[in-house]
Image (cartoon, helix red, strand yellow):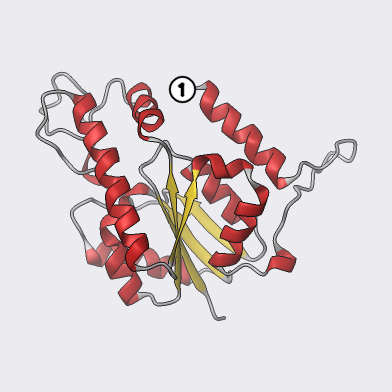
């Protein structure tokens, strides 16, 4: 089976979960969100190959994963896996910052620390870059800003391989269709409705489902 690898990137707290769900619901697809093993920010090519090759063994035409930790690996992935399509999810800096600060009250993935003020997280701490700043908020802001710059530079260098999708585009069905077509899904097969097992309910359109998901995200931030 001729397979396409699909990788999603984004800072996190930026709609990447919704992106993974959209990709995974398409025909003949298996797209995960932050599937283990997680990747360290300091590049580990052996672990990356193990992870991506495991996806390519799946019995689906489009396979992959969405996770913030892929950003440093993008040039290597594009070189080693020529049949790859990537989607970059971007959210505004302030919204992303506020969401991260609320989500990680007791943790700090962006500064080196000894686990005194914040809890150590051996699973996620290695996945983020570290900054020498006075406050956690400064470090998170630097991370988001740097991620945006680096991702947009990569899009400029690889426009045929990376598609940019903004968080607000999750409510734009036509933009979602363009993104899905870019990834390799056939326009005639793209799913725009969810089939409910409850026969009494009217199927939600793809746009309605994504808007509902987006509202839930915003209510929790």
Residue 104 location (% of width, % of height): 32, 26
Residue 87 location (% of width, % of height): 46, 57
Q: Residue at coordinates 89% horizontally, 41% vertically from top-left?
A: 199
Would residue 76 be found to the left or right of residue 191 on screen?
left
Q: Which residue is mark 1?
A: 221
Mark 1 secondary-structure assignment? loop
Q: Residue at coordinates 24% horizontally, 67% vertically from top-left?
A: 46
The answer to whether residue 91 shows anywhere in this view is: yes
From what the image shows, is residue 216 above or below residue 207? above
Residue 77 location (% of width, % of height): 33, 68
From what the image shows, is residue 21 above or below residue 138? below
Classify 10 Å Cα crowding around label 1: few (below 14), some (14-19), many (20 and above): some
Residue furthest out toward the right: 200
Residue 120 location (% of width, % of height): 20, 30
The tally of labels here is 1
Camera-side residue of 119 and 221: 221
Would residue 80 be found to the left or right of residue 133 on screen?
right
């Amino acid at each position: 089976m001729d397979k396409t690898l699909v990788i999603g990137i984004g800072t996190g707290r930026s709609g990447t979960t919704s992106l993974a769900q959209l990709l995974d619901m398409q025909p003949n697809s298996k797209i995960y969100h932050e599937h283990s093993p997680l990747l360290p920010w300091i590049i580990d090519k052996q672990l990356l190959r193990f992870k991506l090759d495991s996806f390519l063994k799946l019995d689906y035409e489009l396979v992959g994963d969405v996770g913030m930790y892929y950003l440093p690996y993008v040039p290597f992935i594009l070189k080693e896996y020529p049949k790859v399509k990537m989607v970059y999810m971007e959210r505004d800096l302030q919204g992303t910052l506020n969401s991260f600060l609320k989500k990680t009250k007791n943790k700090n993935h962006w500064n080196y620390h000894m686990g005194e003020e914040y809890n150590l997280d051996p699973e996620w701490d290695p996945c983020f870059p570290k900054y020498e700043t006075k406050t956690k908020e400064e470090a998170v802001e630097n991370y988001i800003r740097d991620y945006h710059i680096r991702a947009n530079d990569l899009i400029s260098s690889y426009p045929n391989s990376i598609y940019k999708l903004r968080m607000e585009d999750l409510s734009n069905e036509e933009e979602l269709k363009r993104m899905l077509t870019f990834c390799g899904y056939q326009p005639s097969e793209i799913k725009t409705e969810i089939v409910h097992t409850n026969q009494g309910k009217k199927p939600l359109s793809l746009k309605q489902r994504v808007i509902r998901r987006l509202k839930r995200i915003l209510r929790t931030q």
